[in-house]
Image (cartoon, rainbow, N blue to C red):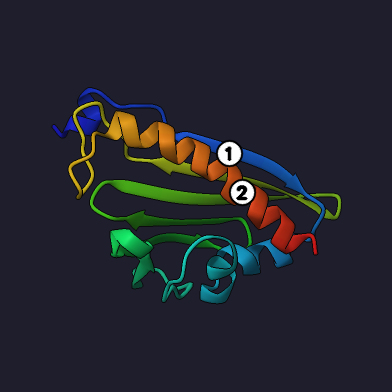
Amino acid sequence: MSDTTQNPLPDIHQTQLFNAPIQKVWAAVATAEGIAAWFMPNDFEPVLGHEFHINAGPFGKSPCKVTLIDPPNRLSFNWGKDWTLTFELIERGGQTEFTLIHGGWSAEGATEFGEPHDVVRDRMNQGWVGLVQKLGAYVQQ
């Protein structure tokens, strides 16, 4: 049994309603160009099993792998050694409800850089607030 199942920390959830059609939001979260516009440079491809990297600047290139793709409603990928990112999209009368889920946190866990998950999780939770707002600005322009 892994540490994550013994002492999990809650997933990060961020949900926003964007005044943009679902296909436009999907293009922003399921293409390399779209992801780079609001998150980080990458070599993503919307293909199940595709291995890619997110360029996290001073933290280097993080390895990722697409684990689920269901256009235009759901995309999941592994990020680094512990994390999973999921983007869920629901059409709401011409608008799109977008939910980001960042999972894989454990009380005993630490990043590749030795930072404890409980410390990083709080920082990332705040960071996602701004990133989801940035995504909203990108798709609503």
Q: From the image, which quarter does the C terminus lie in?
A: bottom right
Q: From the image, which quarter does the N terminus lie in?
A: top left
Judging from the image, what secondary structure is the residue with disc 2 in? helix
Q: Nearer the viewer, residue 64 or 72?
A: 64
The image's mark for residue 132 is 2
Q: Residue at x 23, y 52 (%)?
A: 81
In the visual, does 22 lie left or right of 113?
right
Q: Which residue is mark 1?
A: 14
Q: Percent position (x, y) of residue 45?
A: 45, 75
Q: Dot 1: few (<14), some (14–19), or many (≥20) neighbours within 10 Å?
A: some
Q: Percent position (x, y) of residue 97?
A: 71, 46
> What kind of residue is marked 2?
Val
Farthest left residue in view:
1
Q: Dot 2: few (<14), some (14–19), or many (≥20) neighbours within 10 Å?
A: some
Q: Nearer the viewer, residue 136 or 58?
A: 58
* Quadrant in the rendering for residue 6: top left
Q: Kindly report which numbered mark, 1 or 2, lies closer to the viewer in this rendering.
A: 2
Tell me if residue 82 comes above or below residue 80 in the rendering.
above
Tell me if residue 47 comes above or below residue 104 in the rendering.
below
Q: Nearer the viewer, residue 22 or 34?
A: 34
Q: Residue at x 44, y 73 (%)?
A: 44
The Cα–Cα distance between marks 1 and 2, rounded to whole angstroms, is: 7 Å
Farthest top residue in view:
7
Q: Earlier in the sequence, mark 1 or mark 2?
A: 1
Tell me if residue 10 comes above or below residue 66 in the rendering.
above
Q: Percent position (x, y) of residue 120?
A: 34, 37
* Quadrant in the rendering for residue 11: top left
Farthest front residue in view:
58
Q: Residue at x 65, y 54 (%)?
A: 134
